Image (tube, rainbow, N blue to C red):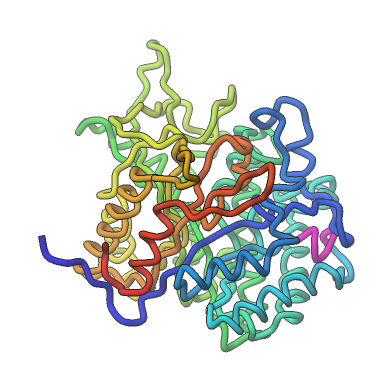
């Protein structure tokens, strides 16, 4: 087997999200987000965990950035908490919140690390949810205003501005299945949220282009690799239907300037899509410097016979309500292992497949792996070390799969491991650990796992260890 070497200039990074690591939920003028409300609602999160303290990054950010530098990373992807910088989602910025991110960005630049800032990683100000949330068109306008203010404050110091992280989750898990904040189960509202997230991306993207022309513009999508269970026409149609909801509902407007016709037809019984106004789709299609791709596992579907017990193993959390709006006739099948602690199947070939699909359909669009990683039940040895061999194996195989796609022509510019730190894993609370650096939540002590040492060898040599 030949040595896997990445090209000079390939970007190695790690990623985090504000609500998952920052804590300081009520400090320095931060307002409540939908995740504050959701995590404090009994029964919503495992063990009733909340992000009130999380990894205490708000107070430990300087030390955490030293860890980023020690890892040899060229870029650090973080998210800005909208309710920290604009507590109610409108009006003047909260200067204490802006100053926090300003210090963060300045320190990254001092360390020679590219700041990659995500404007929205799921923490909508609660006031905006009370006014309708993402199903309401006005939220897109509020997002554009927030983007204008915060980009105006941080300016060209940010290397890459990412509008959204995984709008699929915001729309479908937040408003259809209810397993994410705000926990609503309204299928038509979920599709309205899809559209207003797309619209907000376009509006904010144009603001970023105007205010920070030297910066890179991106969005991060959790694109699904969907496979039919058989070669039957019915199973192929099930895969097509889920691909429309999972992937083309965002790729269509953002990259092609139009929703796919089959998506509109498939969901006609749920909504007439009258919330889409003339010009909206063109607005959503702001040119991107890079498309962020988050990948963890694959999806296996088939047409449900309507009689036998229906399988709903889609990997996105248990709910009596489906995230897959208008697709009651599709079932999601368990897949062969091995699995991560999230119950997700491990299949690196799916990442190669996804990157080559994007290269085929959008050959001129540069790509970036903005999240890839795995949760496992880490064990701390008596001497304090964490030998996370399974995580190293996972990362090794997925990074090799990225290289395979590049060798076949895909224009992949970098890779960000998820995650820098163990953190608040949304509805799973603190039970699932994705970090290459362990966080002891009692003491907040950081400890490099073996995977962190392994990743540093990769980032400093461009060679897969």
Q: Nearer the viewer, residue 145 or 254?
A: 145
Q: Is residue 42 left or right of residue 253?
A: right
- State whether residue 188 appears in this view: no
The image quadrant where one finds the N terminus is bottom left
Q: Residue at x 70, y 50 (%)?
A: 134
Residue 9 in the image, given as x and y percentages of width and height: 36, 81
| Above or below, comparing residue 455 to residue 112 in the picture | above
- Which picture quadrant has residue 303? top left
Q: Can residue 388 be found in the magenta stretch?
A: no
| Above or below, comparing residue 430 to residue 16 in the picture | above
Q: Where does the magenta region start and end?
A: 82-89
Q: Is residue 349 left or right of residue 170?
A: left
| Above or below, comparing residue 430 to residue 351 in the picture | above
| Above or below, comparing residue 187 to residue 285 in the picture | above
Q: Is residue 306 left or right of residue 161?
A: left
Q: Residue at x 29, y 39 (%)?
A: 227
The image quadrant where one finds the C terminus is bottom left
């Amino acid at each position: 087997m030949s040595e896997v070497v990445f090209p000079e200039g390939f970007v190695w990074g790690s990623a985090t999200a504000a609500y998952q690591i920052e804590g300081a939920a009520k400090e320095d003028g931060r307002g409540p987000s939908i995740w504050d409300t959701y995590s404090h609602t009994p029964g919503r999160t495992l063990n009733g965990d909340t992000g009130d303290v999380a990894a205490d990054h708000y107070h430990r950010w300087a030390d955490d950035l030293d860890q980023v530098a020690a890892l040899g990373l060229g870029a650090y992807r973080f998210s800005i908490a909208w309710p920290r910088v604009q507590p109610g989602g409108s009006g003047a910025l909260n200067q204490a919140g802006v100053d926090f991110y300003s210090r963060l960005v300045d320190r990254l630049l001092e360390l020679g690390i590219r700041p990659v800032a995500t404007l929205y990683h799921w923490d909508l100000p609660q006031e905006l949810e009370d006014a309708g949330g993402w199903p309401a068109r006005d939220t897109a306008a509020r997002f554009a205003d927030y983007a204008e203010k915060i980009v105006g404050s941080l300016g060209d110091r940010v290397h890459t501005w990412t509008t959204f992280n995984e709008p699929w989750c915001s729309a479908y898990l937040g408003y259809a299945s209810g397993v994410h904040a705000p926990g609503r189960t309204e299928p038509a509202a979920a599709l309205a949220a899809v559209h207003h997230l797309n619209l907000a991306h376009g509006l904010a993207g144009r603001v970023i282009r105007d205010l920070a022309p030297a910066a890179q513009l991106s969005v991060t999508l959790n694109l699904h690799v969907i496979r039919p269970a058989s070669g039957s026409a019915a199973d192929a149609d099930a895969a097509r239907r889920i691909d429309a909801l999972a992937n083309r509902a965002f790729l269509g407007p953002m990259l092609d300037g139009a929703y796919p016709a089959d998506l509109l037809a498939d969901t006609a019984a749920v909504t007439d899509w009258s919330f889409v106004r003339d010009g909206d789709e063109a607005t959503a299609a702001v040119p991107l410097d890079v498309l962020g791709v988050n990948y963890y596992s694959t999806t296996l579907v088939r047409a449900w016979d309507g009689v036998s017990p229906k399988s709903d193993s889609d990997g996105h959390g248990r709910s009596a309500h489906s995230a897959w709006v208008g697709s009651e006739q599709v079932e999601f099948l368990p897949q062969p292992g091995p699995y991560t602690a999230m119950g997700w199947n491990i299949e690196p070939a799916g990442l190669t497949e996804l990157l080559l699909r994007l290269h085929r359909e959008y050959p001129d669009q540069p790509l970036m792996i903005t999240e890839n990683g795995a949760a496992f039940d880490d064990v701390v040895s008596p001497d304090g070390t964490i030998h996370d061999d399974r995580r190293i194996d996972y990362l090794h195989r997925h990074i090799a799969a990225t290289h395979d796609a590049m060798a076949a022509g895909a224009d992949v510019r970098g890779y960000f491991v998820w995650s820098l730190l163990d953190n608040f894993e949304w509805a799973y609370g603190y039970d699932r650990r994705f970090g290459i650096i362990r966080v002891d939540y009692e003491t907040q002590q950081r400890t490099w796992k073996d995977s962190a040492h392994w990743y540093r060898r990769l980032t400093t040599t461009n060679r897969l260890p």
